[in-house]
Amino acid sequence: MAYLDPGDPVQLAAQVRAAFEERYDAPAAAVGRAPGRVNLMGEHTDYNAGLVLPVALPHTTHAAWRPTTDGRLRVASRQRESTWEGRVDDLGPDAVDGWAAYAAGVVWALREAGVEIPGCDLLVDSTVPVGAGLSSSAALECAVAVALAPDADRRLLAAACIRAETEIAGAPTGGMDQYVALLAEPGQALLIDFESDETTQVPLDLTGHTLLVTDTRVSHELTDGGYGSRRADCEEAARQLRVPTLRRASLATVEDLEDERVRRRARHVVTEISRVTAAVNALATSDWGAVGELFRRSHASMRDDFEISTPELDAAVVVAVEAGAVAARMTGGGFGGSTVAIVPDDRVEAVMRAVDATFVLEGFKPPAHLRAEPSAGASAG
């Protein structure tokens, strides 16, 4: 079984500092860290002014930096051979592409927000799996943001990271990933209301259970058009229903939409928003039967109405439940990525073995697993 270790955060910070000094021949001024995330309920609801319920992962990205006097930005990663270099004054939409756009975009967005950032050297290092639907991009953005501006208001940083992803990297994010990466607290899920912009820490008592994430190794990419087309369908549904967002729509009015595809997209969003509230209540009382049914309905809605699942995700969900998980569903933007399951502690190994065996039989790539202990949000030092 492939198990993804989050690593020790103190050691990771020391490693990125050492690697930074080796690369740039000077010590880092600061290091920021930010977690990946797994979403318990509420997929594709954030950009519809809905509710989401994510938790921060113990898997993190670290970003080391130092200011320079030459007005240039240099971005490198311990996970990539390619680097990027340019002038900070030239940053903007279409100025950077590839993975470096997420880091350089934060520099641009913070400067746009009035934060003074000179030329700088950046180096990032990460244990968040890339392409797994666990928000590696937001972890990168938020690690850079807290390194560059550790004393700034967290909501200002979230807004800057969202601008970086949407306007520089070109991924139509809804903001959930950035909020939880910056605002999460240990042992808590974060309930985010994207209509009121309110966040609530939700205690998550998993006594006797483990949050198990399975990375199907089917690459998840937000800039390939599938995510954007779903967002466009939701906006079209809201336009036809004459509401500002689907948060203001009812299931009854959605069922009257004439276009079948648009109707199914909107139906997923409206029912998923209601499932977030129900999941908060069920988790508060450890009603695992109710949680399991909510996860089942959520996955079916993403598979059938929103059409963002894959055979690998479907198999991982079905097998996890058959092997003893009390709840399982795909998580994240879809088109690949990961599943999340709530598993009794004494069934975790059995669930992982069963999923691995099924993937071999089906001819899928070997999956990887991680234990998702609800963790802290971003910090700098």
Image (tube, grey):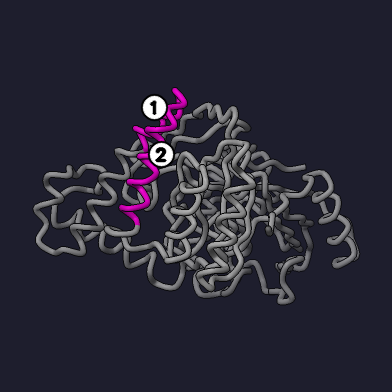
Q: Where residue 239 sits: x, y (%)?
A: 17, 56
Residue that carries the numbered disc 1 in the rendered image: 281
Quadrant assignment, res 96? bottom right
Q: Nearer the viewer, residue 36 or 214?
A: 214
* Amino acid at the residue labelled 2: Gly
Q: Secondary structure at mark 1?
A: helix
Q: Residue at x 78, y 63 (%)?
A: 69
Q: Is residue 365 above or below residue 30?
A: below
Left or right? Give the position of 294 relative to 53: left
Q: Nearer the viewer, residue 117 or 83?
A: 83
- The answer to whether residue 176 shows anywhere in this view is no
* Amino acid at the residue labelled 1: Asn
The local crowd at label 1, few if under 14, some if 14 to 19, many if 20 or more residues have their Cα within 10 Å, is some
Q: Residue at x 39, y 27 (%)?
A: 281
Quadrant assignment, res 282? top left
The mark that comes first in sequence, 2 or 1, is 1
Residue that carries the numbered disc 2 in the rendered image: 292
Q: Residue at x 18, y 48 (%)?
A: 243
Over which residues does the magenta segment extend? 276-302
Q: Where residue 46 sits: x, y (%)?
A: 38, 48
